[in-house]
């Protein structure tokens, strides 16, 4: 949002609980898990030049299910935007093409397909792991990096091209506000974003630790089956950002191909570690 406001864009935030703001940004009551039909979005799509959807849930809670939030609601927004001629920028995630079993991931994949099937002026954004102040996952990983000992799944051999959240915010601003023809859509409307360096999870944590000027930490490998059981336990207890879906992602490369972040920034992305 900061990038949009900084660019002078008139921003309205969709939120479950509008409370009023003092920064000139307006709010509108939106609850994706209750708005899963195109008719729910028709008037809103007709009221804006662009709808930017960054909503995702790590775990299900009551009516807020993966299927409603990651698939049905984005599909409804896409259809409404196509009918209204409104641009729809949808933020998903890297690594969904692998044969995952996590409903967290498979629901996101179905949402991506529904977006593409709807047609219209859509853009699909797949960022890698984000690092930035205030992020739940980023704060947790930075906390892990401060520990003298940390556990890592032995099968977490995939590469991660972590990127700066501020860079991704700037990229989303450009996608949301660019005039027709200003973006290169000749090859694809899909924008995979990541940093310029890729690391395995263990090395990424150590890189974060080095930024805090602490000594080398001991990484204890955990057998894959135990890491998977731990992920299911975290899901059951709603504890930590570690989930079954993230365990699956760590086993495969999470690197953009190609990386379109430099294209959108017109510069090199910031280094994370």
Image (cartoon, rainbow, N blue to C red):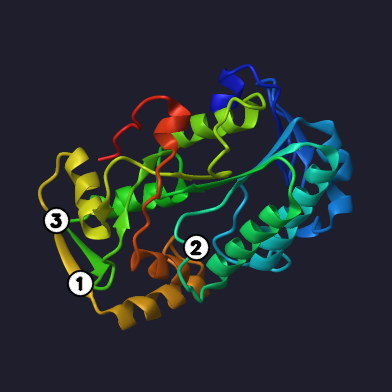
- Point out residue 217 in the picture as x, y percentages from the top left corner: 14, 56
Quick check: 101 left or right of 254?
right
Q: Is the residue 63 above or below the residue 193 in the image?
A: below
User: Which of the two residues, 186 or 5, is positioned nearer the viewer here?
Assistant: 186
Real-space CA distance between mark 2 and mark 3, rounded to the nearest whole angstrom: 31 Å
Q: Which of the two discs, 1 and 3, sits closer to the camera? A: 1
SS type, badge 2: loop
Q: Nearer the viewer, mark 2 or mark 3?
A: 2
The C terminus - image quarter: top left
Q: Residue at x 63, y 31 (%)?
A: 176
**Image x and y of residue 136, in percent:** 46, 49
Q: Which residue is mark 1?
A: 221
Q: Nearer the observer, disc 1 or disc 2? A: 2
What secondary structure is marked by label 1? strand
- Residue behind mark 2: 96
Q: Nearer the viewer, residue 184 or 66?
A: 184
Q: Quadrant of residue 23?
A: top right
Q: Quadrant of residue 24?
A: top right
Where is mark 3, residue-wise?
217
Q: Residue furthest front?
A: 186
Residue 264 vertical placement versus 142 (above, below): above
Marks 2 & 3, CB-CB < 8 Å contact: no
Instruction: Please state if 147 lies on the left or on the right of 237 as rendered.
Output: left
């Amino acid at each position: 949002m900061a990038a949009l406001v900084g660019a002078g864009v008139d921003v309205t935030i969709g939120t479950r609980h509008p409370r009023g703001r003092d920064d000139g940004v307006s709010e509108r009551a939106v609850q994706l898990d209750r708005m899963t039909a195109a008719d729910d979005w028709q008037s809103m799509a007709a009221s804006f030049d662009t709808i930017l959807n960054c909503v995702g849930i790590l775990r299900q809670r009551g009516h807020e299910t993966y299927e409603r939030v990651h698939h049905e609601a984005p599909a409804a927004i896409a259809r409404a935007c196509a009918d209204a001629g409104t641009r729809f920028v949808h933020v998903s995630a890297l690594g969904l093409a692998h044969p995952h079993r996590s409903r967290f991931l498979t629901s996101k994949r179905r949402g991506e397909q529904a977006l593409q099937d709807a047609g219209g002026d859509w853009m699909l954004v797949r960022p890698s792991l984000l690092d930035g102040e205030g992020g739940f996952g980023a704060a947790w990983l930075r906390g892990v990096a401060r520990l003298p000992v940390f556990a890592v799944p032995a099968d977490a051999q995939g590469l991660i091209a972590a990127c700066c959240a501020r860079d991704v915010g700037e990229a989303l601003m450009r996608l949301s506000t660019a005039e027709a023809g200003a973006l290169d859509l000749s090859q694809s409307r899909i924008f995979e974003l990541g940093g310029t360096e890729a690391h395995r999870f263990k090395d990424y944590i150590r890189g974060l630790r080095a930024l805090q000027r602490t000594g080398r930490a001991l990484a204890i490998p955990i057998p894959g089956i135990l890491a998977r059981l731990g992920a299911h336990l975290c899901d059951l207890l709603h504890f930590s950002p570690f989930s079954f879906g993230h365990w699956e992602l760590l086993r495969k490369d999470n690197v953009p191909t190609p990386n379109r972040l430099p294209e959108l920034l017109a510069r090199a992305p910031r280094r994370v570690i």
